[in-house]
Structure formats: structure tokens, C-alpha cells
Image (cartoon, coloured by chain):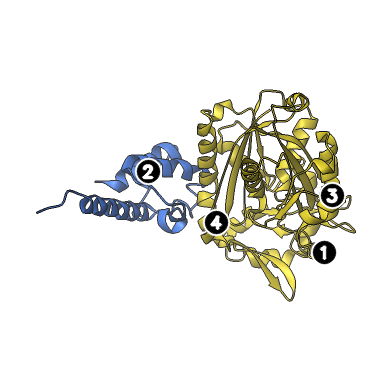
Amino acid sequence: MNVRIASAAYAVPPDGETVEAVLERERDRVQTTLAPLSPQARQKAAEGLGLTRVRVCGGEQPYDLVREAAATAIAEAGITGSDINLILDYSTFPGENAQYLSLAHKLSTDLGAETSMNLSFKAGGCGALHLAIKTALGWMSTDETIQTALLVTGDAAPAGNRSLLPITVQGDAGSAVILRREDMRREDQRREATQGPLLLGVEAMTLGHLHDAIALIKTNGHLEIKVDALRIENEVMPIYYLNLYRLVQKVLEASSLSLHDVDHFIYSNISRRDRDGFRRMVGLPEGGLPLTPMAEYGHTFASDLVINYVHMRREGRIRPGQLLLFASAGIGFTWGVTLARA
Amino acid sequence: MEIKSAVRQFIAENVLLAVHQTTIEDATPLVSGGLIDSIGMIGLVAFLEAHFKVEFEPREINVHNLDTLQQIEDLIRKKLAVREAGAASSGPPTR
């Protein structure tokens, strides 16, 4: 079964806020979170973020961003809503006031995908795109009526929880990815199948004992993201790149490829220092990772990879035949890597 | 098996470049002291697994188990003991 990334799109709200203003407004929360760390680690926490501004949902809800991104992705794939057989919503923070149990169900109605299978899961944070791709591939491989899948995530930081220091600062965004199965029996689809990267492999892993390193809790009826800075430093960071590296090796070896074969690494926008760590992990020289709009958008959870992929395509950096490696890790804790050939 | 000296030599030659191995004490905090970072852990764990022919579970790799040479030796010895016990119990039955 060959499945391609037929299209991808994202949407961000027009309103923005500076990271400096966020950290000033959430100063008490930041100080409480960082208090268990050494003075050196506390100082390092706010350095090297590489984030200047974040986009902020005002009147919009994450669902509005998802719908906009989905409509764009559908148009770019040259299909209509009725062609979609599976909608998978993997949002982590779909909005405190989200009216819908699952964005997928509402989306199927609004897009005219009335016969689609609609699913939703909340796992993985920034690593959730890989889980969504793997889940979609599972459905496609066991149900041949599923030819086209729409994967969406829409995330907005809970009020007062935009800072996730010592890790990042969160911006709001929605994104959509369309996967299409190649059907070699149809000539028209054979032509279409030449468009979009071919998925070669997806690997993911989770570690449940780290579930509360970044915990989602309700305080006085409001969702709060609680970062355990000491556990992040002592238990997550020693294995953060190690697990990512092992998954990278696993997905490459499964296709008889190596790091040297990868043309483009597409990685999260958590922070400049995190991207630098990933760059060192894969053995790229300084400046070896492509520039991303992270300074303007902040870290947008699982939409980061879609945003960076879309930007690389817009800039014409991805050429046919090139090997793309998507990698990210997130709450759960979850690590994921996806390999595709453009 | 001299575990600490092998690990000390590896760290001095591959992770803490230009640091003489005699300056790495048994109780020197390697991870929490900032001497080995997250990227350095990739090489250290690969070395430990290959050199001592052991495998680490992901949850074993943390600052509580691998921060000092002494902790590393303790963990390696524990894993070797488990492996040897497993090999002994799966040996040929005695009459």
C-alpha cells in the first residue's frame, strides 16, 4: 500500500503577542515552575528560546483555524470534502470552550464529508502527528474503502498557560494534512499519485512513567499545564534526544537508508536551543537546519511540523526524489519520526 | 571487570574532550553537573551497551542512575548479575 502526503496547510490567528509580554504576565507561574532548579538552570531557561512573538486566538477558536487549514489542504489536493473517508483529530488543546466533543465530527459536516469515519485522540502533544499518521495508515491498510484521510490539530494555550518554561512558549495554530492512497487501477489517480511525498515509514514510542513531567490539571475549573522542571531536567532530557535518535535510526534502517541520505530534516519549533540539540544529534553543521517561522509563531504543538513543511514547500526547497525526515517529541512522553520521499 | 576505568576513559576521550580522565572522580556529577549533555548521553549509552553487552530500558536512563561513575558501575553490575543469573537458570539440567 502506497500512501502519499497529498497536501498540508495551516492557519494562525491574526492577533499576536510578544514573548516578552507573555513572560512578564505569567511571571509568578514561571518563577514557581523554575524554583526547584539550580540558579544556573533557571538562568538558562529563558535563554536561547529564539521566539519573539506568538499568535493568539482572540475571537477565533482552534476549530476555526482547523477548518480554515482543512479547506486549504482540500483545495490544494484537488479533491472535495466528499472524497474524504477518514478524519482524525489529534488536538491537544482544542480550546477550553470547545463546543465539540471531537473536532472531526463537526468538520465532517462542515466540509461535506458526510460518509467519513471520524475519530479523535488526545496523546502525544508535539509528537502527535506521527501517531495520527500511523493510525491513519492502520485504518487504510485494513479498510480498502479508505482512500483519503484528513488529519487535523487545533491548539490554543489555556488562559494564563502560554509559558512552558523551561521548555518553550506556546502560540495558537491549526493545521491539516491530507494522506491519499495510490490506486494504480485508475489512470487519473496514477497521474495524481506523482504529487506529494510517499510515506516510507513511521516510528513512535511513549513512556508512561513520564506522564506527569508535563501534566494537564484542572484548577478551579480551569485547565492548567503544570511543568515539573526538575523531572524534565533529570528524567526527560537525558533520554530526549537518545530516544529520538533511536527512532530515527530505526525508521531509516527499515528502508535501508542512513542519516546521510536525508535531504531535509523537519523538526519542531520548541526553541532555538532545542533545534540546535536536534541539529547536533543528526550531525548537521551550524545553520544546517532550515529557518522556520518560529520567531513569529512560537511553538504550536503538533502544528510545528506542518508549518515548517509548508514553508519549505512554498520556498521551493523540496524537490522530487528528496528524502524528508519529520521528527518531534511531546507530552506523554511521546517520540515520533516519519520518513517520506518527495 | 574494571567498569569505572573503562567508562572514565571513554568519557574523557569522547565526551569531555580535552579533560584528563584523572580529573573525573567516582562521584563527579556528570549529567547534573553539566559535563554530559543530552547529546552526550547518546554516545555514552551506546558505549555502555556495546562495551558491556547490556541493554538499558528507557526508564533506566536518568540522572538517578547515570550521574556518576559509581552509579554507572552499580547499574552495569546489577544488569550483568541479572544476565548471569538468567544464563545459569537456562543452562542444561543437572541430574
Mark 4: which amino acid? Glu
Chain identity of mark 2:
B
Among numbered discs 3 and 4, the one appearing first in the sequence: 3
Residues at badges 3 and 1 in contact (C-beta under 8 Å)?
A: no
- Which disc, if any, is residue A67? 3
- Which disc, if any, is residue A99? 1
For image coordinates 41% across by 56% down, the residue present is B65
**Label 3 neighbourhood size at 10 Å, few (<14), some (14-19), many (20+)?**
many
Residues at badges 1 and 2 in contact (C-beta under 8 Å)?
A: no
Residues at badges 1 and 4 in contact (C-beta under 8 Å)?
A: no
| Most distant residue in the bottom direction | A220
User: In the image, B48: left or right of A104?
Assistant: left
Q: Are marks 3 and 1 on the same chain?
A: yes
User: In the image, A29: left or right of A70?
Assistant: left
Camera-side residue of B50 and B57: B57
The secondary element bearing badge 4 is classed as: helix
Tag in front: 3 or 2: 3
For image coordinates 60% across by 30% down, the residue present is A285
Q: Identify the hue of chain A.
A: yellow
Mark 3: which amino acid? Arg
Residues at badges 3 and 4 in contact (C-beta under 8 Å)?
A: no
- Which disc, if any, is residue A233? 4
The secondary element bearing badge 2 is classed as: helix
- Which disc, if any, is residue B49? 2
Q: Which chain is blue?
A: B
Q: Quadrant of residue A27?
A: bottom right
Among numbered discs 1 and 4, the one appearing first in the sequence: 1
Chain identity of mark 4:
A
**Label 2 neighbourhood size at 10 Å, few (<14), some (14-19), many (20+)?**
some
| Most distant residue in the left direction | B95
